[in-house]
Amino acid sequence: MENLLLIGVIGLGVWFWLDSMNARERAVAAALRACREINVQFLDQTVVLESMKPARNRQGHLVLRRIYGFEFSIEGVERRRGRAILRGQALEQVQLDSDEGTTIEQY
């Protein structure tokens, strides 16, 4: 019985790790696409997990809502903040901060 429980815990850990890697890859792609669309430079070519909590998707299923932060530059001098928000594996929105406020692209 203990072995079965251990296999289940390991399986859950592997699933969570794979799910997190897929979500991170989607966040990087979304940030890169959003930066290209407004003609700014996506800095460091990476995102960092800022928040993760349970939420419901459009079908009502329980999923993880992850917020990934990233940085971009308009003229290559200053660093500005952005966020890619995923609900499960679906991109919810990308937010780009600027002097005029936050630009939000809904998906």
Image (cartoon, rainbow, N blue to C red):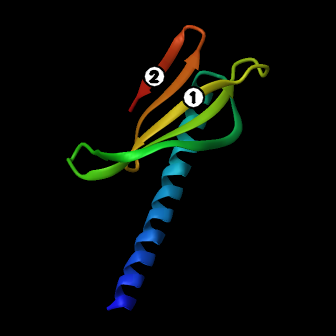
Disc 2 target residue: 104
User: Which residue is located at x 50 percent, y 26 percent?
Assistant: 95
Q: CA distance from mark 1 to mark 2?
A: 10 Å
Q: Is residue 102 above or below residue 83?
A: above
Tell whether 78 sits left or right of 3: right
User: Which percent across, then down, holds residue 45?
Assistant: 69, 41
Q: Quadrant of residue 72?
A: top right
Residue density around tag 2, few if under 14, some if 14–19, many if 20 or more, within 10 Å: some
- Secondary structure at numbered mark 2: strand
Q: Are marks 1 and 2 in contact (CB under 8 Å)?
A: no
Residue sitting farthest toward the left = 60
Q: Is residue 90 above or below residue 34?
A: below
User: Which residue is located at x 50 percent, y 64 percent?
Assistant: 17
Q: Quadrant of residue 28?
A: top right
Tag 1: residue type? Gly
User: Which percent across, then down, holds residue 56?
Assistant: 26, 45
Tell whether 107 sits left or right of 62: right
User: Which residue is located at x 40 percent, y 50 percent?
Assistant: 89
Tag 2: residue type? Ile
User: Which residue is located at x 40 percent, y 76 percent?
Assistant: 9
Q: Is residue 49 visible?
A: yes
Tell whether 99 sits left or right of 3: right
Disc 1 target residue: 82
Q: What label sits on residue 39 in the rendered view?
A: none
Q: Is residue 94 above or below residue 3?
A: above
User: Which percent across, then down, holds residue 8?
Assistant: 37, 79
Residue sitting farthest toward the front = 2
User: Which percent across, then down, holds residue 46?
Assistant: 65, 43
